[in-house]
Image (cartoon, grey):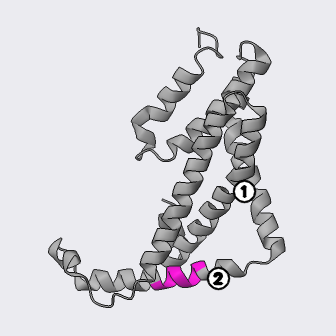
Amino acid sequence: AKIAVLTRDRMDVGTGGAVLVGETVAEAFTLLPLAILAVLFLPGGRTGAYAALGYAVVVVAAVVALYWVARLPLRNAPRWWLRVGLSVRRWRVLRVVARRFRHRSKALEHLSAHDLALVALWSVVHIAGRLAILPALAIGRIQGRGAGLAAIIGWTFILLYGGAMMPTPAGGGAIEAGFAMALGDALPADD
């Protein structure tokens, strides 16, 4: 969806892919200290940390795989490509996109320390904002106040990053069902 919006605004797909690589890699690396904080300060934080770290590993592995595939020197369409009914023209377009993606992604390696610090800061703000939505909505309804809030933050961490690896769209309600099951004791029954 993000690439569709970027291409609508006249950014080519390869450059859009590189932008998404920068965003996802920054988030993956920012999750490491946040996962450590979850382990140290949240009840059940260890499970949330594992979900976040699993997400980070999957994201980084996917980026490495995409970058590796984009570097493949295949000039002609492979036989399997043609067997499944895809055209030689589509293969050429894919190779152009892969070349732009590789070139733009490589440029990310040359960001200054200042730019990297800003990216890290905004990644923390982004993740904290995502983690704060459910606690902010539930703050007045939590039973047992402190323990309930910690449970909501911990489970939000788990479901946000564990759920991100579920098939689209969000595992067909798996995230919502997970919230309901995990937080049943923290929220009043009449909600």
Quick check: can you spot residue 12?
no
Taking the magenta stretch, the answer to whether it contains residue 101 is yes
Residue 107, numbered label: 2
Residue 150 rendering spot, x and y as whole percentages: 73, 26
Quick check: can you spot residue 79?
yes
- What kind of element bears circle 1? helix
Part of the protein shown in magenta: 99-105
Residue 88, quarter of picture: bottom left
The residue shown at (64%, 11%) is: 188
Query: Predominant secondary structure in magenta?
Result: helix
Instruction: From the viewer's perspective, tell me whether residue 80 is left or right of residue 30.
Output: left
Vertical placement of residue 124 versus 140, above or below:
below
Amino acid type for the residue under numbered disc 1 = Ser
Residue lying at the far bottom of the rendered structure = 75
Q: Residues within 10 Å of mark 2 (few under 14, many from 20)?
A: few
Q: Which residue is mark 1?
A: 123
Residue 93 rendering spot, x and y as whole percentages: 36, 83
- What kind of element bears circle 2? helix
- Of the pair 85 and 1, the residue shown nearer to us: 85
Taking the magenta stretch, the answer to whether it contains residue 91 is no
